[in-house]
Every structure is written in C-alpha cells, then in structure tokens.
Image (cartoon, coloured by chain):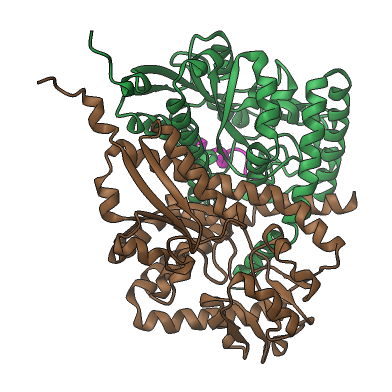
Chain colours: A green, B brown
C-alpha cells in the first residue's frame, strides 16, 4: 500500500451548510456570512466549502440556533439575542440595554473574558461561537408621533424585541414581535405606533420614513449589536486544527469587515433619509434615564433566578464601567472636537 | 511516474521573515505580528511559517518598509506614517492630524476605497499592504508644565514625529525625534519639555508620569492610528491563492484583535497612572483649533507639489466629513449618555 501523503490528512473535503438569520436584502449583515464562506473556500482551495442559505431557505431565521443545537446544520450566522426566549443570557452575545459599544464589545469578547464566558454558557446548546460582525450603535427607530417624556411611552405599541421589549413594558409600552416585511403596513395602518429596525442603510430599504417620520436615536438597547457564527460542537471538533484556524481567522475578518461596511454606507443613507423627510430626534434625557432605570431593575429580576445570567451580567457590567472610564478621555474628546469642528464648517 | 496529488501544489513549504517596527516590550502592538504569524502557521499545518523579529533584530524599526521594498525581508508590521520622509502620502495608512478615528479608518480601508488608493500608491515601493491593527485615539502625551494657550507651544521642545511635528512647528514648537528608550532621561533632564508616545497601557511602562506629570488628551494627530502588514509584491505574487486568502484573513483577525487588546488594557492602566500622580488635562479648544488650522495649511502646502498626496488627501477628508455626519447621531449620543450616566454613578 502507498501511504497517503501527510498533507492529505489536513485538507479533507468538508461541506458545511450555513443558515443565516437574515434575508439577502440586508446585504450588509447577510454579506458577512458570504465574506466568511468565501474566505474559507479560498483558503482551502475549495476543499472546505460552506454553502450560505438566507433566512427561511432551509431554516427559519429565528431558529438558526436550534438547527445548530440539533446538528441539522453545521453553522449559522445569527444574533444571539434572538434566543432570549430560551435564556436571557444569550443577549450578552449581541447587546443588552445600556451595554457596550461596538469596540468595547470586541474588547470584551477577545480580551475581556467575554468569549470564554459565553462559550462556557453556549456549551449547553452544543454551540461553539465566534464573533462575526457588528452594526455599531443602532438607531432608536421610527415613530409616527413625537415622544418627549417617559409618559409618552405609556400605551405605545412598538415593534421591538428581546430585553428591550421587557424594558419598555415597565414604562407601559406594548412591545410587538413583527417580521421585517410586515412592519411597513403595520406602521401605515397604525396597528403599531413605532418600530425599530437597524440603522439608516438598512432602514432606508424598508421605507419607514414615509409612514413614521420621527427617527429617534440612539438605540440604547444596542450600543454595538454583535453577530456571531454559531458552530455545532461536534462539527467543530471534527475539523482538523488547520481548518479551525482558518475558520477563526475568517470570522475575525468578517467581524471587522461588516462593521466597516455599515460605517461606510450609513452616512449617505442618513443624508438621503433626511432629504426625503425623516426627522431626526434624540431621545430626551428623562426618557433615557427612565429606560436605564427599568433596565437595571430587569437585570436584577433576571439575576435572582438565573445564575448564568447573573455571572455574565456582573462581569459584563464591570467591564463596561471600566471601558467608559477610558473612552471618555481621549476617544470621546477627539470625536467631540471633530463633530463640533465639522458643524462649524 | 506517480502524479503528485493536486493538493500538494497549493500547500508548498513557505518560510517568510517578518520584521516588526516595534520592540517586544510593546506587547500589544508587537503582539499583532505574533497573532498573525501564529494563525498563518496553524491554518497551513506549519507549511507556511512566518518568523517574527522585533525591531532591530534583523532590520531597524524605522527601516522596515525599505526591507520590504528591497525584498530582503518578505513582510513587515509597521506604521506607514513612519515613512513620511520618503513621501508624506504614507501617513494616510496610519493617521493624519484631525483625521479618521479607528472605526472610520477601517471603514475607509475596507469599504471606502482606502486600500485601493493606498495600494496603488504603495506599488511604487514594491509593497502590498493589509490593515493589521489600530491603537484607537492616542493620548496627547506628557508635559512638564501645563500648556493653556497656543502661545504656550511657542519654543516648546516636544518629542513628536511626522506630520504632527510639522504642524506644531507652525506654532513655534520644536519637534524632536527621539527613540522610545531615550525619552525618559530627556524629559527628566529637561532636554525636552514634552513627549508623546501611545496611550496609557504603553506609556505606563516608560514611567513618564514621574518626570512630566501633565498627561494631555486627545492626540489630535492620531485619532485612530492604524498598523499595516507590508508584503513585498513579488513575495505576494509567488504565494498560491489559498495562502493569499489565509494571509488576508489572518491580517483581518490581527486587526480587530489588536484594537480589542488596547481597549481591554487601557482602562486599568489609566487608573494606575492617575493614582500614581499623572494629571489628566484636555487640550484647550483654542489649542485644538490652532493646530487644526495649521494642519489644513500644511495639507494645502504638500498638495501643491505632490499629486499622490492631494489625491488621497481629498478622498480621505471627504470620507471623514461623511463619517462624522453619521457618527454624531447615534454613536456619539450613545457614548455621551453612557459617560454622563457613569459619572453620576
């Protein structure tokens, strides 16, 4: 018998499917999975091919994690906070109200113990996770009427999910779960009063400005919303070490690339939205404070009965406080100056 | 004859040397080259090995680009603005006074046409470049005395390099080029009045707070200082496509990883520095404005005689203005709120 060359053992043919939680129309966020799969294929001379499916093609968008847990699909690209119904601890993988911004989220993931904590938790779901993109601070969404005080949230029907929905519920609002394509008619008919989506580049495509002109900011429930690649633990363990390294590197590239794409595309989109009638409005300080107070209450409630949540929450919030100690110095002062200078022309 | 398996052609043994412009003591920035080389080795089962050398081991730190241009070394990890003596256009690869912040720099590189423009320029130097790290907004450095007005810059001897040195020269300051290890004694003896280095985590190691207690911010000359991997064009062209993809992915990972490391380590360092006597001071608005005015003048002067500089400058500054149009909305308002909220406790 002729011995197989050693290298053959490390470049086996592997075929994975990746189910995205996003439609192709969200090209920035969906595109991160394509960037990832393309790099993995190129890096292995097409020996390791990952076929990317949009939400709903093989798995519904919000069930991507289940498909990984069950091993019916090897890999997905998703927002962990979609799974707060399973356990609110998932939220720390994406964003929690009044949490980390995009860079801080990466600092926590890569060098603040975040991925160790999260992957320890994700083990229960047969998931190995790698950070794979960020949107930056999202917008607060589209409102049919101005809201000026916390009292204006009372009775407000808003399309908003996850922990943020539970926060505004404490202020009397009525959170609604509505799929992307159904938001526009709901806003138009007045079935809902407000809806949050992502930011200018994505929001523009859905045309919300025509039916709900008040465009609020910031999206305090996603200061830096992170996406992840979830990989089935057995599928991950079966990969040779070199393929694991390629997947790790490609996910890192997709991570920085996706944030860069949003940052490059949002400016022109926000300008077009304002030109076509969107009215930018900051949430008032008392609305922000009331929502933060409600968030802190919610975290305390969940922490009482959920040790995983408490453990990660406490580490995450301590990290957040340290991050803003530093960011308020050079980073924030620089941006402040540049923004003022730009306004002066 | 037995035909070699096809895969053998795409996983040749390759040995590169990488010369870093940084000493090992700057573990965060030097570490990015190690992260990069380790991923490339793991991804290729050690077929493609990149040996990392610290500044001065095989090439002096500030001559790394020359070694790539001459092909004596295949790859380096460096700050392009070290080479403004060759051509000030190099500066756009790292940072220019009143330029982009870290995220915006990546947005420009990956999706704003930045790397196309830079690599077109770098061709003249036989360099192919990939972004490979960022420090975030640096600090403005250490001063023996407080400076309150632009007039206080007059006659000030400051360790500061590149375009920033030419900017403060316009205000009467005397820029000095001093290697890292020589800064402390120069500050102690009063040979110089001030020195800029990087940020809290790196600055702390050199102990400047003991001899120049006023720690100014922000470093307006590096809003988001980027590092790059420079690769000799022939060495790059010789790589099989799959190795090129691995190098690209690993550089992307190193890019996001290095910023994360700085962001994770700076908070504790700034706290320790303040506890040991460093006095934080913001540059006054009139100093910032005078320096920005001098920067704009400098850009106009260089642009007159340097078409490469003008072309990239104009694209870069248009991009910057767009970026801050967007960043001032959700991103900045979110950070503002979080910083105020933290201060209230």
Q: Which residue is painted at 44% across and 31% down in the image?
A: A246
**In the image, residue A85 lies at what x, y percent?**
71, 17
- Above or below A237: residue A25: below
Q: Quadrant of residue B84?
A: bottom left
Residue drawn 28% across the image and 16% down it: A4
Name the one closer to the observer, B198 or B68: B68
Point out residue A171 in the picture as x, y percentages from the top left corner.
Answer: 85, 32
Task: Please state which of residues A112 and B61 is positioned toward the viewer in this rendering.
Answer: B61
Q: Give the image quarter of residue B15.
A: top left
Q: Which residues are magenta?
A: A205-215
Relative horizontal placement of residue B26, taking residue A258 as reference (left or right): right
- Measured as percent of width and height from the top left, residue B102 is found at 57, 56
- Asked if residue A210 is among those painted magenta in the image, a careful observer would answer yes
Q: Is residue A241 visible?
A: yes
Q: Is residue A224 magenta?
A: no
Is A281 left or right of A23, judged from the image as shown? right
Q: Is residue A47 above or below residue B337?
A: above
Viewer-proximal residue, A211 or B37? B37
The residue drawn where x is 28% and y is 55% is B233
Between B1 and A61, the one nearer to me in the picture: B1
Judge left or right: residue B109 versus residue A141: left
Residue B317 appears anywhere in the view:
no
């Amino acid at each position: 018998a002729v011995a197989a060359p050693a290298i053959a053992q490390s470049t086996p043919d592997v075929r994975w499917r990746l189910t995205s939680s996003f439609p192709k129309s969200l090209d920035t966020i969906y595109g991160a999975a394509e960037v990832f799969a393309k790099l993995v294929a190129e890096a292995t001379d097409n020996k390791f091919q990952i076929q990317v499916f949009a939400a709903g093609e093989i798995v519904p968008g919000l069930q991507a994690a289940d498909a990984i847990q069950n091993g019916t699909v090897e890999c997905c690209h998703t927002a962990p906070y979609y799974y707060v119904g399973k356990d609110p601890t998932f939220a720390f993988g994406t964003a929690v109200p009044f949490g980390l911004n995009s860079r801080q989220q990466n600092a926590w993931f890569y060098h603040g113990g975040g991925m160790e904590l999260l992957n320890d938790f994700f083990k229960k779901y047969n998931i190995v996770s790698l950070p794979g993109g960020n949107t930056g601070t999202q917008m607060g969404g589209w409102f049919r009427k101005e809201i000026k005080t916390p009292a204006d949230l009372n009775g407000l029907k808003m399309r908003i999910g996850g922990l943020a929905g539970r926060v505004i519920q404490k202020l009397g609002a009525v959170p609604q779960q509505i799929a992307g394509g159904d938001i526009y008619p709901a806003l138009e008919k007045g079935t809902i009063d407000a809806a949050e989506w992502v930011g200018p580049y994505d929001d523009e495509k859905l045309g919300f400005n025509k039916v709900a002109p008040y465009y609020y900011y910031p999206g305090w429930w996603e200061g830096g919303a992170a996406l992840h690649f979830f990989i089935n633990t057995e599928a991950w363990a079966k990969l040779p070490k070199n393929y694991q390294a390629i997947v790790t590197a490609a996910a890192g590239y997709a991570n920085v690339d996706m944030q860069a794409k949003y940052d490059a595309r949002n400016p022109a989109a926000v300008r077009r939205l304002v030109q076509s009638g969107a009215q930018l409005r900051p949430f008032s300080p008392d609305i922000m404070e009331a929502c933060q107070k409600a968030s802190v209450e919610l975290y305390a409630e969940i922490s009482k009965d959920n040790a995983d949540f408490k453990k990660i929450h406490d580490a995450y919030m301590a990290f957040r406080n340290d991050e803003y100690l530093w960011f308020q110095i050079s980073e924030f002062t620089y941006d402040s100056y540049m923004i003022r200078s730009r306004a002066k022309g």
